[in-house]
Amino acid sequence: MNWLFHLGRYWIFIKDLMTRPEKFSNYWKQFVRELDNFGYGSLGIVALVSVFMGAVITIQTVYNLVNPLIPMSAVGIVARDSIILEFSPTMISLVLAGKIGSSIASEIGTMRVTEQIDALEIMGINSAAYLVLPKVIAAIFIFPFVVAISMFLGIAGGWIAGTGAGVITSVDYISGIQNNFIPYNVTFAMIKSVTFAYIITTVSSYHGYHTGGGALEVGQSSTDAVVYSSILILVADYILTQLILI
């Protein structure tokens, strides 16, 4: 029944974020800092994963395309839809759960064990909202842009790998990307990115905020934040797919 305890405490934590927020002017500097951390600070790993992800999808699709009746432009269609619908929003969010989630949990957990959060509460500040809400808002705002960049780099990486290896022509690949494109797939990916941003920031903040003990417990909270964020991302991915696409 331990999960019921954490579930209830998590929703109480979310309620504290929304019921007594501080003035937005108090959040602005933190909001801008988190935008830089979540966006610009994550572009390196996002770009690396996206390019190689697109390259692998393209090469593997060509390798498994054994039916001569299927045109080579199908490779571009498969790469485009795989990257837009699943790999960019979901895989990149899993990567960011490890990078951003562990950072959030460690930061807030350290503040908890060093009694900085207690000091904020003594001053009458809603510590949960002050520390967490700017992170949540910044992630929800910036994640769609990061995912959009990942989509572009993933498709570009597939083009570079496919044409560079000589397994597909540039004309066939670009033709496949343009063929039967459904704009709503991008909208669906943006919905997923916003949902995953909320999960990563709130779950990681929850584990950091309720850290007890010392440095060892901070490390455990960081690990738990990444594990539970990743699990919830996969569950939410399945639920959203069932609700929206099917």
Image: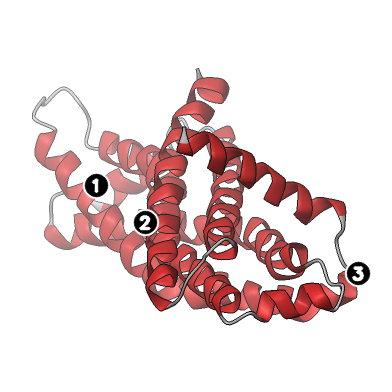
- Classify residue 114 as left or right of residue 213: right
Amino acid type for the residue under numbered disc 3:
Lys
Q: Is residue 46 visible?
A: yes
Task: Tell me the mark number nearer the camera, choosing from 2 and 3.
Answer: 3
Q: Is residue 18 above or below residue 33?
A: above
Task: Identify the mark nearer the N-term, 2 or 1.
Answer: 1
Residue at image position (32%, 69%) is: 48
Q: Residues within 10 Å of mark 2 (few under 14, many from 20)?
A: many
226 or 240, nearer to the observer: 226
Q: Earlier in the sequence, mark 1 or mark 3?
A: 3
Pointer 2 with pointer 1, Cβ within 8 A: yes
Q: Residue 217 in the image: x percent, y percent?
A: 42, 68
Q: Is residue 168 visible?
A: no
The residue labelled by disc 3 is: 23
Residue 191 vertical position relative to residue 97 in the rendered view, above or below: above
Mark 2–mark 3 contact, CB under 8 Å? no
Q: Gap in Å between the C-alphas at discs 1 and 3?
A: 47 Å
> Where is residue 97 shown, x and y percent of the image?
44, 58
Between the C-alphas of marks 2 and 3, the distance is 40 Å
| Distance (Cα) linking label 2 and label 1 | 9 Å
Name which residue type carries label 2: Gly
Residue at disc 3, secondary structure: loop
Q: Secondary structure at mark 1?
A: helix
The answer to which of marks 2 and 3 sits earlier in the sequence is: 3
In the drawing, what numbered circle is on residue 57? 1
Q: Which residue is labeled 2 in the image? A: 154
Residue 37: image quadrant is bottom right
**In the shown orientation, is residue 106 left or right of residue 231?**
right
